[in-house]
Amino acid sequence: MGYRLSKKERLLVDYLLFPLQSTGLKTLNEPFFADLSEGICYYPELSDSSLEIVTEWMCPVIIFAGKKIREESHYHLGKLYNYGLPAVWKVPENDEPVIFPALNLPDTRHHAYFISENPHYRKLFRQILRFGAYNTRVDFQSNEGLETELKRLAESKDSAWPSLIIVDLDSVKIDVQSFFYLLRSLFQKNPVMKGKTSILVMKDFAKPGLDVRTIASSLKPLTKRIFHPHEAILALSEGMCASKKADKTVDIRIKPFRSIEDFLYGKVTEFRYEDPAKLLAGTVKINSNFNRFVMFSWLSEYLSSDKISSGVVLNPEPVIDPGNFFNGIRSP
């Protein structure tokens, strides 16, 4: 979807999208949900009102943003962030190298549950996870519904069992303490299943609500960290791009992307943000994972410009590194 593109920028985006014409790409003036049933759609002149409509569809969206947004970059990128559209490719200016984003959307290979009543986070996290090949459910409204579904999947050994569960501790409709008790009970009966499931817990500590100390003992068997939502966004944005070890580049100028498991259970002490242009110094091989990360790299710059509360480590003696961006995600 084109957002504030000049004529020259539209030509560059047309060039980028040209290979998709063989797959039935349609260029349309206004977005209609029915058009999506016929394949990939491109809207070159999307208005702010149309952007808001598209986010309600919950389909994967890439925004091609023109340099018209540069003068008020934080304002316009803030709009896209608030609309829940994290995949943004800022069309480069004349003196910048062109790194095209990855347009191939991977087939869904995993399932994720996102447990939160925050409509903004529902949109944003579902978009990020879809680009990482996750089919995500966000519609849970009660503990009863969650319990019924998880028990059914566990008993039937259904392949739709979520390999990633994201829990917002600021949820009200879901009693998170009861939910974590349910998970521990299911994992005790199915130890193998525990090894196949990653748990990401997040909370905005600036908001009143649940006292984490009351559920720390329940969380420790399931996860090592509680993320601030902004930290969770950044961790997932990189984790969605992580490839298998055999596929990682050997070029020392590009560190391998870290997986979701690295962030949740490893000793991650910082979030790496580097301008994509800087990574082109010399003859650097840009693989498909890096091209996908290009769409999300702006999030680090955007979120780090705000003063945010950090997450915490569920460890009595964390090693504190005050200099890293993830200053609440510390090595045990």
Image (tube, grey):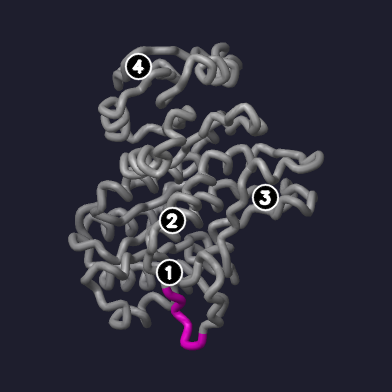
Query: What whole-number distance in Å separates the C-alpha atoms at marks 2 and 3?
Result: 32 Å
The answer to the question of whether label 2 and label 3 lie on touching residues, with beta carbons closer than 8 A, is no
Q: Where residue 244 is drawn, which disc sits there?
A: 3
SS for dot 2: loop
- Please give the range of residues in magenta: 312-317
User: Residue type at mark 4?
Assistant: Asp
| In the displayed structure image, the side of residue 75 where residue 147 appears, left or right | left
Query: What whole-number distance in Å separates the C-alpha atoms at marks 2 and 1?
Result: 40 Å
Chain-order first, disc 4 or disc 2: 4
Residue 178 is situated, as x and y percent measured from the top left of the image, at 26, 71
| In the displayed structure image, the side of residue 33 where residue 3 appears, left or right | right
Query: Looking at the picture, does residue 37 appear above or below residue 84?
Result: above
Residue behind mark 4: 35
Q: Name the residue at the front extreme.
A: 71
SS for dot 4: helix
Residue 59 is situated, as x and y percent measured from the top left of the image, at 37, 32
Query: Looking at the picture, does residue 13 appear above or below residue 92?
Result: above
x 62%, y 51%: residue:
274
The answer to the question of whether label 3 and label 1 lie on touching residues, with beta carbons closer than 8 A, is no
Q: Which of the two discs, 3 and 1, sits closer to the camera? A: 3
x 39%, y 75%: residue:
219
**The C terminus is located in which quarter?**
bottom right
**Dot 3 surroundings within 10 Å: few (below 14), some, or many (20 or more)?**
few
**Dot 2 surroundings within 10 Å: few (below 14), some, or many (20 or more)?**
few
Chain-order first, disc 2 or disc 3: 3
Chain-order first, disc 3 or disc 1: 1
SS for dot 1: helix
SS for dot 3: loop
**Dot 1 surroundings within 10 Å: few (below 14), some, or many (20 or more)?**
some
Query: What whole-number distance in Å separates the C-alpha atoms at marks 3 and 1?
Result: 26 Å
Residue behind mark 2: 305
Residue behind mark 1: 187
